Amino acid sequence: MDSMINVRNMIRFLGITIALMLITLGIWTGGYQDILNKATHICLECIGIG
Amino acid sequence: MGIQKVTGMMKQKIRHLTQCVYAVLYNCHITGFIKGEIYQGNNKGVCVPGLNCYSCPGAIGACPIGSVQNALLSSKYRVPYYALGMILLFGILLGRLICGFLCPFGLLQEVLAWIPVKKIKKSRVTYYLSYLKYVILVVFCVLIPLLFQTPGFCKYICPAGTLEGGIPLVLLGDGLRSLIGKLFTMKMTFLVLILVGCIFLHRFFCRFLCPLGAFYSFFHKVAVVRMVVDESKCNGCGRCVRECPMDIRQVGDRECVYCMKCSEHCAQCAISVNVLQGKKD
């Protein structure tokens, strides 16, 4: 039981670390800017026009 | 009325209040609804956890599933680290709690379910249909953006985009109104069908079609916040699964959206939401 919780917590820790690393890498490589550009202009596909 | 029933009602009220607060928070750019323009602040690149179209005039954040598709579109030039990192973080922290508490479209579906008509109950058919959202995730959110360079889910299915973005922008802007074509008609038809479906089937879109819920469901075993059953209290009556409106096979599985109807009906008070703990067994 305890070992199962430990494994689960380890996966969580690993997952959160990977997610934060991906976000940092994404901001660094311009991924954030891409999404910002998309989000600040009307997405014609989303609203059913284009 | 028993204390357990009162506590259950309180939990539901807190949940509905949270859903309302988050729906307003995601869409608090009120002037956008008046002017028919979308928010263009520098923080709009931050994804919100729930399904909320970034073309909604009130939206102050980015839609996670739209961001992933957009990132995959440009994946030839740039690996989509940021969008993947965001939804991975949301998934591992909250799992499908997001569907039950933080999704505006989930709130809308629950409001529609209050319309008093004869409901279609969950069955083996609805259980198998719940796998459809995984097909939509793979085909419309991954394969179509990669192969055809178009955001498949946003373009052909997403009812949130039509409802939150399409309808207000078309109503408020003359320029867009003149561009309406077959695609808009198709998306409007989809939206109406989905909304009607939600009246007869609890969380119709969530259960069968939502790719974001499908993605978050992958984290049901490891999410930091989880629904757990205290095995020392559970007498195995199975009421939790019977009373749950979703297609669950056990409490806290991939279909569980943390609505807490199970804990409301559990006479043993064995079900709770747990943070950073494993299964109590």
Image (cartoon, coloured by chain):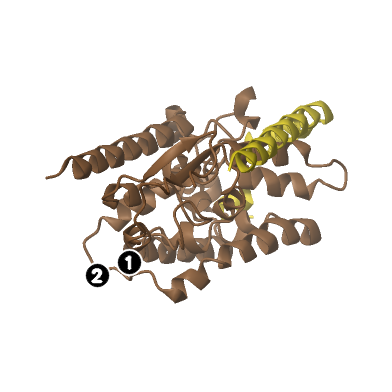
Chain colours: A yellow, B brown
- Residue B36 in picture, x, y percent from top left: 48, 37
- Rendered position, B77 above or below B115: above
Say which residue appears at 50% left-offset and 42% top-offset. Answer: B226
Instruction: Farthest residue to the bottom: give it.
Output: B125
Is residue B173 in view from this perspective? no
Disc 1 to disc 2: CB gap under 8 Å:
yes
- Residue B34 in picture, x, y percent from top left: 41, 32
Quadrant in the picture for the N terminus of chain B: top left
Is residue B238 in view from this perspective? yes
What residue did someone put label 1 on?
Answer: B200
Q: Is mark 2 on a helix, strand or loop?
A: loop
Q: What residue type is labelled 2?
A: Lys
| Label 1 neighbour load within 10 Å: few <14, some 14-19, many 20+ | some
Lateral position of residue B173 relative to residue A29, left or right: left
Who is closer to the viewer here, A16 or B131?
A: A16
Q: What element carries label 1?
A: helix
- Residue B142 in picture, x, y percent from top left: 72, 57
Q: What residue type is labelled 1?
A: Phe
| Label 2 neighbour load within 10 Å: few <14, some 14-19, many 20+ | few
Q: How far apart are marks 1 and 2 (CA)?
A: 7 Å
